Amino acid sequence: MRRDKSLIPLSHQHQHALALCVRIDRAQPIPPKNLALWLEEIERDFAQEFENHFSAEESVLFPAARQFPEMIPLVDELISDHAGLRECFSWAGAGTMSLEALSDFVRQLSVHIRKEERQLFERLQQLLTAEQLKDLGAQLESVLEVAERACSLPSETTRLKRRN
């Protein structure tokens, strides 16, 4: 199903997060000396985009989905995912995330994003009217415009690597 324009800003942020996951996957195995650079980038991305993204979903999107009893278990699962991902971001910020935990973080983040895109967004587009989606989009835009407008560029070490 084509993404409704009200959800496109969140989908764009999902693309940014998935790009980070791809770069980390392609960098494997990450030399221990480079781990700190990856953790700094993860912390910066959380501060610049993910933190506000989670807040927008939790304050606007999830309450809209909770109106439908069939969506409540999925929303509860996504909220739990957010808590686990916040913990990972905290470890990155503290510099305490291990290489193994970094790989687990990438898997968790990828699975979470795909769950939102394929289950939450798709079903909301079926359940909400065009007017409700438009109102949802306006609310999301209001929350997301608070986000820091910065472009985080990867370092030489964390940029996308070509596959051999």
Image (tube, grey):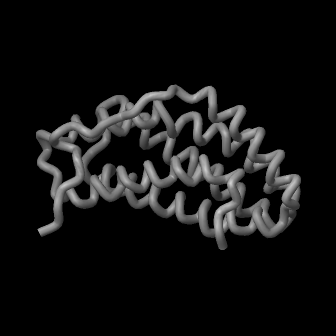
In the rendered structure, the answer to whether residue 22 lies left or right of residue 112 reads left
Residue in view at x 61 percent, y 69 percent: 118
Q: Quadrant of residue 150?
A: top left
Residue in view at x 77 percent, y 40 percent: 138
Q: Position of residue 90 (x, y in %)?
A: 43, 34
Q: How many marks?
A: 0
Work out which quarter of the rendered image holds the N terminus and state it: bottom right
In the rendered structure, the answer to whether residue 93 lies left or right of residue 123 reads left
Residue in view at x 85 percent, y 59 percent: 130
Work out which quarter of the rendered image holds the C terminus and state it: bottom left
Residue in view at x 19 percent, y 58 percent: 28
Q: Position of residue 83 (x, y in %)?
A: 57, 44
In the rendered structure, the answer to whether residue 3 lies left or right of residue 65 reads left
Q: Quadrant of residue 123?
A: bottom right
Which of the pair 132/92 is nearer the observer? 132
Please say if 38 is above or below 30: above
